[in-house]
Image (cartoon, rainbow, N blue to C red):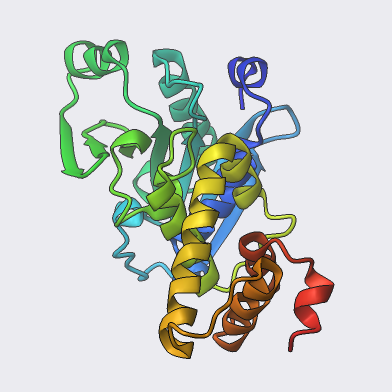
């Protein structure tokens, strides 16, 4: 992470992205070795992220990992940062160093840039100065026909939430609907909310929207309870209502942290409902 991001933003976006990438590649993580801040040498030369295939023949169907080869270098830029021409060439330099230190060929390496959006100066540099082609292969995913490495630029703002929920929602402008989708998917994957860098950054970056999403989920859950228990149950007391919602969520296996967020009950109270 460079000095620009640290000055502008005190949220731990890189740590959140590293966690979100693991969620995004759900189904492949047992077959991948994912390292954060891989150190190239004893000096302060570090790659943001390194993803290594444990099996060379592994094919990743997920759109952001389809380009991956055996060794995959990732440079992440937070929502308040951007990818400059010097950044682009610096990471390519890191890729050459990694190739030399690990004694592997450039053909075994890919480079991925995660950016809010590619800027015009970099695009002009790649097209007009370097003479590379830029192909759009999916929503927000660009392949750069670089002569050195297989390179992709992922424009976070243009990603499809349906295809890349975790990376697409790691920003400061998430809608309540998409945050609600995110909470549901985290619960589906049995993700623990407490001390989770991804959840912490997304919620801190979008505090008002997060409250709306939680309210939406609480209302949806209560509607389900009412439908199943009957419209005439007369749950007018708010505490009683939240406890009934909590019981229902416990019955379907929702984690305690999610239930606490939605019902505003403490974890001990929720445990006592079992």
- Asked whether the viewer can see residue 105, the reply is no
Q: Residue 122, located in which quarter of the rendered image?
A: top left
Give above or below for 45 relative to 178: above
Q: Residue 126: x, y in percent?
A: 25, 19
Give whichever of 270, 12 is nearer the camera. 270
| Residue 192 left/right relative to 118 | right
Report the label total: 0
Q: Quadrant of the N terminus?
A: top right
Q: Residue 138: x, y in percent?
A: 20, 46
Give above or below for 67 relative to 40: below
Q: Residue furthest right?
A: 268
Give whichever of 203, 263 is nearer the camera. 263
**Residue at 75% over, 76% down:** 270
| Residue 271 left/right relative to 206 | right
- Asked whether the viewer can see residue 157, the reply is yes
| Residue 69 left/right relative to 76 | left
Give whichever of 45, 189 is nearer the camera. 189
Q: Residue 187: x, y in percent?
A: 54, 70
Give above or below for 207 relative to 167: above
Q: Residue 42: x, y in percent?
A: 75, 33
**Residue at 30% over, 56% down:** 163
Q: Quadrant of the C terminus?
A: bottom right
Give above or below for 269 relative to 100: below
Give whichever of 24, 44 is nearer the camera. 24
**Residue at 57% over, 48% down:** 18
Q: Residue 150, located in which quarter of the rendered image?
A: top left
**Residue at 56% over, 43% down:** 202
């Amino acid at each position: 992470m460079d000095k620009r991001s640290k000055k502008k933003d005190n949220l731990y976006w890189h740590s959140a992205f590293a966690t979100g990438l693991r969620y995004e590649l759900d189904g492949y993580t047992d077959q991948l070795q994912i390292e954060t801040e891989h150190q190239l040498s004893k000096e302060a030369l570090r790659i943001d992220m390194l993803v290594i295939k444990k099996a060379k023949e592994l094919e990743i169907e997920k759109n952001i990992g389809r380009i991956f080869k055996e060794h995959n270098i990732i440079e992440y830029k937070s929502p308040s940062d951007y990818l400059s021409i010097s950044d682009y060439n610096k990471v390519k330099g890191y890729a050459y160093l990694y190739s030399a230190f690990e004694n592997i060929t450039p053909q075994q390496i890919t480079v991925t840039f995660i950016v809010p959006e590619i800027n015009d100066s970099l695009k002009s540099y790649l097209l007009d100065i370097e003479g590379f082609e830029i192909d759009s292969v999916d929503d927000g995913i660009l392949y750069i026909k670089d002569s050195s490495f297989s390179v992709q630029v992922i424009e976070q703002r243009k990603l499809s939430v349906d295809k890349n929920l975790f990376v697409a929602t790691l920003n400061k402008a998430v809608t309540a609907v998409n945050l609600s989708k995110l909470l549901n998917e985290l619960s589906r994957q049995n993700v623990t909310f407490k001390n989770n860098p991804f959840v912490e950054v997304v919620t801190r970056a979008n505090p008002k929207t997060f409250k709306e999403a939680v309210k939406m989920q609480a209302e949806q859950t209560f509607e389900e309870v009412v439908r199943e228990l009957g419209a005439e149950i007369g749950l007018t007391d708010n505490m009683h209502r939240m406890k009934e919602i909590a019981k229902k969520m416990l019955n379907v296996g929702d984690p305690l942290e999610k239930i606490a967020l939605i019902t505003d009950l403490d974890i001990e109270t929720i445990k006592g409902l079992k």
